[in-house]
């Protein structure tokens, strides 16, 4: 028998969202006539914008013609898409198309990035608490953490508490972390990071030689013009930060699959003999060995996001979900519930009423209101006593969910 990767055995029970799915299925089997509204996983509900569909249809037709047929594409993504991304998302930020790597998802890229870094505890890793579970679980798999304690915190990881008191911008640690995960707009709290705050992280990274892994999957939902959309708006970030972006939430691609990661030339890591190696070289090597790129059809669809029509139509999608977020925020506030987020992000982070635990509140909302959310404790110890509602749903479902919550509480 082969030896397994023992680190997997350190992982706490299932990944959060499958665990929620399990509880929801059990409830539905026991109550088949109770219709549920799902505001749990942040999965989009609205159809693909016309500009994107038209571009994808045209790409299908190209593939149906011998003259324009294409086989394997470049592993990094087609020039037309990487150029559109650089010119639009990073305009004036000195990011070249060569530094952009198109992929099938930010979750995959965040996890796969650990392939090019030393594992087995060679790097000290810092994460926020609450945290998008992928950052933690992939580090456990890579051997960068020891067993979890009774609060579910893994030995060896640095946890940075994000609380209402610190505006969900955790204090910069004294200790040195080699790798720091930052996610803004934040999943799960819906908080954003100021320019000053991100500048402190860049200064920290420069001082300690750390790598910042900046997850900006929700950047399109920022409404406040003062809030940075990219870590590269901060001077010096080109030398220490990798940024993850996705078409999942802004363009409705959770099922279509397309994302990209920016690895600027200046970002390096150290080999065991002390040589500095550009991480972009290693990432390119990793991707070209293990990944064959995103389909041409999907990349044409993603590029259509950057056309005038695409910008207008994806803008409408974003406005639609942010109106849901506003309704959720205001509806809950009217019930006397403390809410955070939902202004520059599609997630509302609410304090569970009367000291109910996150999972108790989950069960209560499920059984009494038929509404599914995500228990804050599932994102980490500091998420206990909080609950996340996603703004990704139809208007009708959001309105019905709010009425049902009101009746249940
Ligand atoms: C979430 O609900 O946190 C998201 O769906 C996670 C993801 O995009 O993977």
Image (cartoon, rainbow, N blue to C red):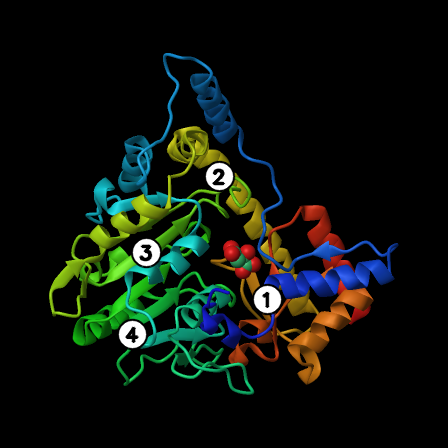
Residue of label 1: 16
| 222 versus 5 height, above or below | above
Residue of label 3: 243
Tell me the CA gap for discs 4 and 1: 25 Å
Tell me the CA gap for discs 1 and 3: 24 Å
Residue of label 4: 123
**Residue 314, label in figure:** 2
Of the residues under marks 2 and 3, which one precedes in the sequence?
A: 3
Q: Nearer the viewer, residue 404 or 330?
A: 404
Query: How many other residues sit within 10 Å of disc 3, few (<14), some (14-19) or many (≥20)?
Result: many
Marks 2/3 in contact by CB < 8 Å: the verdict is no
Question: Which residue appears at 24% of the width and 54% of the height?
Answer: 282
Query: How many other residues sit within 10 Å of disc 4, few (<14), some (14-19) or many (≥20)?
Result: some
Tell me the CA gap for discs 4 and 3: 19 Å
Tell me the CA gap for discs 4 and 2: 39 Å
Query: How many other residues sit within 10 Å of disc 1, few (<14), some (14-19) or many (≥20)?
Result: some
Where's residue 284, x and y in %?
26, 48
Local SS, label 1:
helix
Camera-near label (4 vs 1) is 4
| 356 versus 60 height, above or below | below
Query: Looking at the figure, which quarter contains the C terminus?
Result: bottom right
Residue furthest front as drawn? 1
């Amino acid at each position: 028998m082969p030896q397994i990767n023992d680190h997997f055995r350190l992982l706490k029970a299932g990944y959060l969202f499958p665990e929620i799915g399990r509880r929801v299925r059990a409830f539905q089997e026991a109550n088949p006539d109770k219709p549920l509204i799902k505001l749990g996983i942040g999965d989009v509900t609205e159809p693909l914008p016309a500009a994107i569909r038209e571009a994808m249809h045209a790409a299908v037709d190209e593939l149906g013609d011998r003259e324009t047929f294409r086989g394997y594409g470049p592993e990094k993504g087609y020039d037309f898409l990487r150029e559109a991304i650089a010119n639009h998302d990073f305009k004036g930020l000195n990011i070249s198309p060569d530094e952009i790597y198109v992929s099938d998802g930010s979750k995959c890229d965040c996890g796969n990035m650990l392939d090019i870094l030393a594992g087995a505890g060679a790097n000290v890793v810092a994460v926020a608490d609450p945290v998008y579970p992928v950052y933690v679980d992939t580090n456990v798999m890579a051997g960068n953490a020891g067993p979890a304690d009774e609060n579910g915190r893994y030995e060896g990881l640095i946890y940075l508490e994000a609380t209402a008191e610190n505006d969900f911008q955790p204090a910069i640690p004294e200790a040195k972390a080699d790798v720091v995960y930052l996610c803004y707009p934040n999943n799960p709290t819906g908080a954003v990071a100021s320019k000053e705050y991100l500048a402190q992280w860049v200064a920290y990274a420069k001082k300690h030689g750390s790598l910042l892994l900046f997850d900006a999957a929700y950047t399109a939902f920022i409404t406040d013009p003062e809030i940075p959309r990219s870590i590269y708006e901060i001077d010096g970030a080109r030398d220490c930060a990798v940024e993850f972006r996705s078409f999942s939430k802004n363009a409705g691609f959770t099922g279509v699959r397309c994302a990209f990661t920016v690895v600027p030339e200046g970002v390096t890591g150290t080999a065991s003999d002390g040589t500095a190696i550009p991480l972009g070289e290693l990432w390119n090597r990793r991707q070209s060995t293990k990944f064959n790129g995103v389909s041409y059809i999907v990349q044409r669809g993603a590029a259509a996001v950057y056309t005038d029509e695409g910008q207008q139509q994806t803008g409408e999608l974003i406005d639609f979900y942010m109106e849901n977020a506003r309704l959720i925020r205001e509806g809950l506030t009217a019930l006397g519930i403390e809410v955070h987020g939902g202004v520059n992000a599609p997630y509302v982070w609410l304090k569970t009423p009367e000291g109910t635990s996150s999972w108790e509140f989950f069960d209560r909302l499920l059984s009494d209101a038929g509404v599914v959310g995500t228990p804050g404790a599932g994102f980490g110890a500091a998420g206990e006593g909080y609950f996340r509602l996603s703004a990704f749903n139809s208007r009708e479902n959001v309105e019905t969910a709010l009425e049902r919550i009101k009746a249940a509480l």
